């Protein structure tokens, strides 16, 4: 049978429709599409796709179940390696990981591995109501700090081995960046809640509104009887450019802007969460978070949304799919541009004028790409005399985040690097005995799947440690 050279397109909402609602953009494969896409898999003996997956899902095996129409068998196969399949199928950059290693991709488009994973997880969630069997307790207790992808993965892997696991989450809802950072139209929060409920069924306890370093310290967790601690607290401390005007009303970090919309539901008509809506919005940055912020601003009613990025489209770090979706929805890409000042309204004759202190425009300069820097990327250089003003009402800074220093400042013997990331060895062990860490708390902002891989690695190391000491 001849192989289809192209993967099956993902059905999506029309751009002019989805740009005005928060419903999921991608609609998912049908059963027929999933089986047809699975049949493109060559079932290679050396399985190069598995090496490209940070959690080493048995990809050819789960795809083989799909070929046979056994979708639950496929789900169980994925679940041997991943605690969050419905999440991974939606937000992982498969194009640079598993799919980039696909043998079929040498000549044709690779197998749509991520789309198949999403289909399988969604099929299971829609058709299977039984909870997973709770493992027999092994008598050991582990605390997990943070309920993002790294923490949830570590907790799930340990729970499956019979550990008594408690996850401590600073916010009022479990999920970490999955609930506060990724918009509803990319990752519905019901999906995250379902994945969390599956972990609870395995026996994982989740304590919300607990800030480790304030409510409790790592030392106190050990005093409470926990034998090991995993820190997966993420990187929620936003970065700014330190240019004039960043303190004006209408300037947000991407973290705040997305948290207000996603976690605090500012996008709902009945929400009382304050957020800037309408007008003209500039999002500074070019990563996935910048795309999320820009597309969220559109859906909140902005009349115009700009992505302001100092390099060209070729250097844009966001996933190509997210960039294409943003372009289709009408986001204006201001490339090779960089802000130097944010300007605000000021009425010197009336200090009580309600318009005082609000953003009115952003002064930018045009850039060109010069010689490569130490990482091989061509360095942006300012074009002399190229200043101009971009009329905007809201500015969202999306230029990166770093780990919150609270935990390291309250934990004795925990070493961090110059960026504030916790220093660990290849197994996730920190400089302090019995304390492990992974995800963005170690690396700084990175992908969901890399954080999951770190959580899985640490869980194995914790198991080895507690079972042999």
Image (tube, helix red, strand yellow):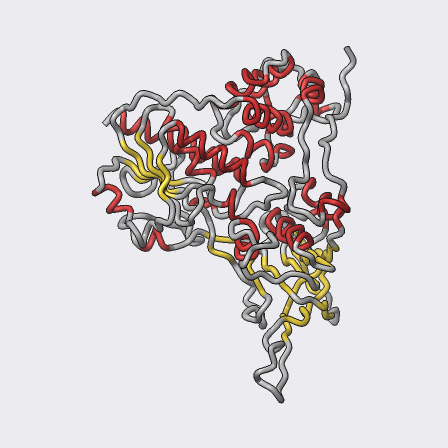
Q: Position of residue 20 (x, y in %)?
A: 71, 49
The residue depicted at 40 percent of the width and 34 percent of the height is 426
Q: Residue at x 57, y 70 (%)?
A: 249
Query: Which residue extends farthest front?
Result: 270
Kindly tell me whether residue 423 is visible in this rendering. no
Name the residue nearer the viewer: 128 or 342. Answer: 128
Whole-percent x, y for residue 16 in the image: 77, 46
Q: Is residue 376 above or below residue 225?
A: below
Residue 464, position in %: x, y?
31, 26
Q: Position of residue 324 (x, y in %)?
A: 73, 43
Q: Quadrant of residue 333?
A: bottom right
Q: Quadrant of residue 65?
A: top right
Task: Decide if residue 99 is on the left or right side of residue 404.
Answer: right
Q: Is residue 227 left or right of residue 86?
A: left
Q: Quadrant of residue 361?
A: bottom right
Q: Quadrant of the N terminus?
A: top right
Query: Can residue 357 be seen by looking at this rendering?
Result: yes
Which residue is nearer to you in this view: 456 or 152?
A: 152
């Amino acid at each position: 049978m001849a192989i289809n050279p192209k993967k099956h397109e993902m059905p999506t909402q029309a751009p002019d429709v989805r740009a005005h609602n928060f419903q999921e953009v991608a609609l998912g494969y049908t059963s027929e599409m999933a089986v047809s896409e699975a049949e493109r898999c060559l079932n290679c003996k050396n399985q190069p796709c598995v090496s490209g997956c940070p959690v080493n899902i048995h990809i050819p095996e789960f795809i083989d179940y799909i070929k046979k129409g056994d979708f639950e068998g496929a789900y169980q196969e994925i679940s041997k390696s991943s605690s969050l399949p419905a999440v991974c199928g939606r937000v992982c950059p498969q194009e640079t990981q598993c799919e980039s290693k696909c043998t079929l991709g040498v000549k044709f488009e690779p197998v749509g591995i991520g789309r198949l994973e999403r289909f399988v997880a969604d099929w299971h969630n829609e058709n299977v109501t039984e909870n997973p069997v709770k493992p027999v307790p092994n008598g050991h207790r582990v605390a997990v700090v943070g309920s993002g992808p790294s923490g949830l993965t570590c907790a799930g892997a340990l729970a499956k081995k019979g550990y008594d696991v408690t996850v401590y989450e600073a916010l009022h809802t479990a999920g970490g960046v999955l609930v506060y950072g990724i918009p509803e139209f990319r990752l519905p929060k019901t999906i995250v809640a379902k994945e969390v409920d599956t972990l609870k069924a395995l026996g994982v306890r989740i304590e919300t509104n607990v800030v480790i370093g304030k409510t409790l310290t790592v030392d106190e967790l050990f005093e409470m009887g926990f034998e090991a601690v995993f820190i997966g607290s993420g990187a929620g401390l936003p970065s700014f450019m330190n240019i004039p005007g960043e303190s004006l009303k209408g300037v947000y970090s991407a973290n705040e802007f997305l948290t207000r919309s996603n976690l605090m539901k500012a996008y709902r008509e009945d929400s009382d969460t304050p957020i800037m809506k309408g007008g003209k919005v500039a999002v500074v940055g070019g990563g996935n978070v910048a795309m999320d912020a820009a597309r969220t601003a559109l859906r909140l009613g902005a009349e115009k949304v700009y992505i302001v990025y100092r390099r060209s489209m070729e250097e844009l770090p966001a996933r190509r799919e997210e960039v294409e979706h943003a372009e289709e929805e009408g986001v204006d890409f201001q490339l090779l541009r960089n802000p130097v000042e944010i300007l605000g309204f000021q009425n010197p004759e009336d200090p009580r004028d309600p318009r005082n202190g609000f953003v009115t425009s952003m002064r930018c300069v045009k850039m060109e790409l010069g010689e490569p820097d130490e990482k091989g990327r061509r360095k942006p250089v300012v074009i002399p005399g190229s200043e101009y003003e971009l009329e905007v009402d809201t500015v969202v800074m999306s230029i990166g985040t770093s780990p919150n220093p609270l935990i390291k400042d309250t934990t004795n013997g925990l070493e961090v690097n110059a960026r504030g990331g916790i220093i660990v060895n290849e197994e996730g062990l920190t400089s302090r005995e019995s304390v492990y860490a992974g995800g963005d708390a170690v690396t700084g902002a990175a992908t969901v799947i890399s954080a999951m891989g770190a959580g899985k690695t640490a869980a194995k190391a914790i198991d080895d440690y507690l079972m042999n000491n």
